[in-house]
Amino acid sequence: MSERRVVVTGMGAVTPLGNDVKTFWENAVKGTSGAGRITHFNPEKFKTQFACEVKGFDPKLRLDRNEIKRTDLYAQYGIDVAAQAIEDSGFEFDKMDPFDVGVIWGTGQGGLETLEKEVQSYTARDYDPRFNPFLIPKMLSNMAGGMIALKYGYMGINYSAVSACATSNTSIMDAFNYIKLGKAKIIITGGSEAGVTEASIGGFSAMKALSTRNDSPATASRPYDPDRDGFVMGEGGGALVLEDYEHAKARGAHIYAELAGSSMTNDAYHMTATHPEGLGAYKAMQLALNEGKINPSEVDYINTHSTSTPVGDISEPAAIRRLMDGHTNNASISGTKSMTGHLLGAAGVVEAILSIQAIRNNIVPPTINTDSIDPEIGDDLDIVIKEAKEKEIKVAMSNTFGFGGHNGIAVFKEFK
């Protein structure tokens, strides 16, 4: 069976920088911070009292009343961005075999907010110890993908991947592979996360993973800076419509970019820390580029994982340096979590969207808040700080790494 080319024909986003792709991209280029004091709950008792929350999200725009009632916020973000991407792609589903269209969706935490609230409610009363009948379906990690399929009648491949913060890149990779092998013509893929909850903020805070700059949330996420003190929690989701190129061409679809290669490896080093020399990250990037028949020197932009943690920000540049083998100045680098915060299982797809937009607009979005580069990282990398950079971009790579040692890479290139 010959492999097919895979292209991106639709995109959708709900992020701390905007609830559609256009607004998201414009605010990213401007260097806007999405951080502010937490409003989802009273954060007074927490060491970290801020996050990058989604603003002005109205689930009623794209979900009906029953869908809202039966879904956790993470799934509502997922259904919304999938609807955006499907509309953007312009394909007419009623002209297709429903088994040719699939959904591969990811989330790191699933319906944590629902679980948290139900347990709190249960323990607060002793007169009627019952749970909401929607507890289980609302908390399940596969439910966003299931509800997207249910909404549109897509009967093809459907499941959810979980690889912590590499999750949505894992989903993109799986969708890519299924289409290449001819097992689907179109797959809606991506991820969503609603991680600004008491349990999530409290848990990551207990790990000392979160920044505690409560006096200046907007400047708290500062990848590569010597004064970085942890990541900022984010939330939202993103969706891509991946399509068999021949199918897209036949229907006259607009093509944003080509997905050229992807790969996953594991560090097998530590539960939460990345390999100090970035061995797994290096191999994953190498394999993804090899699949796309792209030389490392041809990479124009890398959207790095760079969460703004003291340890995590050091290993990835080491891996990039090894990959580039003397051509480190060819690829511009930026850490856009400085603006969006860390969307956990949705991080990869929103950063993939920024990577695709970078190719389309020949602009590298900036790493904000970074005043100087940590000497441990070195000074031979083109890390774009403070302001966006205009540059011809034909190849962009999106990197994600997750607890458990997961490394997920997606490589996009200009469509020709």
Image (cartoon, grey):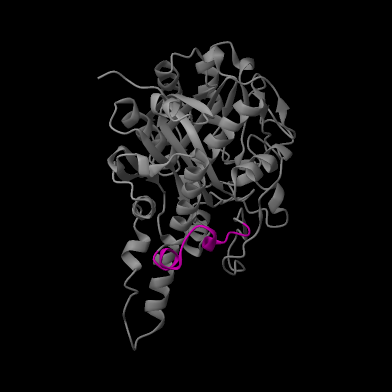
Q: Residue at left 44%, top 25%?
A: 249
Q: Residue at left 66%, top 45%?
A: 23
Q: Residue at left 42%, top 60%?
A: 112
Residue 187, quarter of picture: top left
Q: Is residue 64 above or below residue 324?
A: below
Residue 168, quarter of picture: top left
Whether residue 173 sits left or right of residue 204 in the image: it is left
**Front-most of 274 and 299?**
299
Whether residue 58 sits left or right of residue 4 in the image: it is right
Q: Is residue 160 above or below residue 118?
A: above
Picture coordinates of residue 259 (x, y %)?
46, 26
Q: Is residue 67 magenta?
A: yes
Whether residue 3 sits left or right of residue 355 in the image: it is left
Query: In the orientation shown, which residue stands out farthest toward the bottom?
Result: 127
Quadrant showing the N terminus: top left
Query: In the orientation shown, which residue stands out farthest toward the front?
Result: 95
**Front-most of 71 and 67?**
67
Q: Residue at left 64%, top 16%?
A: 329
Q: Is residue 35 magenta?
A: no
**Front-most of 271 and 362?**
362
Residue 4, quarter of picture: top left
- Residue bounds of the magenta highlight: 55-70
Picture coordinates of residue 328 (x, y %)?
60, 16
Picture coordinates of residue 278 (x, y %)?
47, 27
